[in-house]
Image: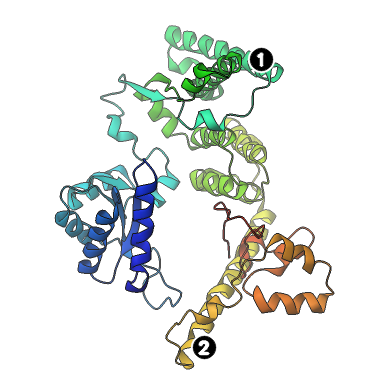
Amino acid sequence: LGDEDRQLVLDIVEAGSQSVTIPIFVKIRLLDTVEETIKLCHQLRDAGASLIAIHGRYRASWERTGPGARDGPAMLDQIALVKKSMPDFPIISNGNVITYDDVVGNQQFTGADGIMSAEGILNNPALYLPRLGDAINDADKEVVLPTLSPLNKRTTVGYTPGKQDKVLRKLNKKLREIENIEAKVKESGENSINEDQSIKLSAKSKILAEIMEIERSDLDHNRKKSTEQTESSVATYYSTKVKLSQLYKNANNKLALAKEYLSLVRRYPMKIRSVVFHTRRMCKEVLEKYQLMEECIASRTTDEVEVVLNKCECYIRSPETFKYDLEKEAREKEALKRKREEEGKRKAFEARMVRKAKREGLADLNHYLRIGAEIPTVDVVKRLKSYSKEECLAAWKKDHSQHCMSFHLDEGGCKRDRACAFLHVEAKDGEKFDEKDEVAG
């Protein structure tokens, strides 16, 4: 966001706003002075941005001489000044939000049009729930929830008649069971059902959504490829009504929230490392209590993650079945110690490269951090696997020295995984940009 790249950033925003009909949103961090931040925001607005979200901390840098990416409280006073200078333009404030009281306080202090949360909402996906009402005074209030997004039309798995019918029968069976539980609650009260039945009740909205999606797929399948089909390409919104008390009940059950998240993952697939990341953030306390954190982290599929959550539920229902493993605790402490040591290697490498650039009087302190940063392509990895060990190492050091050679070339990948001091980035195919690439190191 410095002056050297400012025009490029503005050109990107302008080109985007002129090329698409949807709004262009921009997220930034604070610049070195509030005046510079205000100037940037005005420039982004004039270039075509429809909304700007501001993280109230300064930009992180390789040099690491000042505060880190999240060190210290966010400087909401600077966001307030930006908003004051742009009263009619949407500004979103980001920072210092852990509880809903923080959400309210942030908005009142900054005058922002909305509040963004990162760390807080990772730990508690129901962070914003109180905006719908009070857990006690508004318990009987009915909330309308959407059960189908516009993206579903494009992301639904292809129609398979036999498979769809079988799934629909199972879902209707679950729904009938839930209706029986609801009748029991109505007759004898909530205390008349066990925790397993309560969890089934909380899944009603998800099951209804899945039933409606299958029924919609049936309808689409039977339509001819004509104008009628073209008109149906516009997604339809479906909704269901849920009592606020039920939402609060789900919000207080982190395992239920995590399982709801997994149901969304199955509808909108993502990389397993992201699934594990979000699950362990939501359920950290219970995973650590029952010594299942490492098992969760080691999961390689969404089903494996759900198996771990099911174990947690079993231990909660039958506490006597859980036996604390002291040997496992010792192993986990040793593994954590090794991980921290390995993670420190990357920071030490970055610091050494910056010091080297300083000693040589280079204007660009990141000069050596750019060397060897090139991501290997699929073709390069394939070719290197045919080299001798010495030839392979020489070629790797020349162009990809910051990347983990074991991750790309060893059978089974890098054994250190997240603790590795080198970068773990999937190989490119040489011609195509993949925006799903993730960096770990």
62 and 226: which is toward the camera: 226
163 and 197: which is toward the camera: 163
What's under tag 1, amino acid-wise?
Asp
270 and 20: which is toward the camera: 20
Q: Is residue 370 above or below residue 213?
A: below
Q: Is residue 428 above or below residue 17?
A: below
Instruction: Give the SS element for disc 1.
Output: helix
Q: On residue 356, which mark appears?
A: 2
Q: Quadrant of residue 80?
A: bottom left
Residue at (60, 44) in percent of width and height? 290
Q: Is residue 343 left or right of residue 416?
A: left
What's under tag 2, amino acid-wise?
Lys
Residue 365, x across and y down, in percent: 45, 82
Q: Is residue 371 above or below residue 24?
A: below
Of the numbered discs 2 and 1, the one sitting upstream in the chain is 1
Residue at (49, 83) in percent of width and height? 354
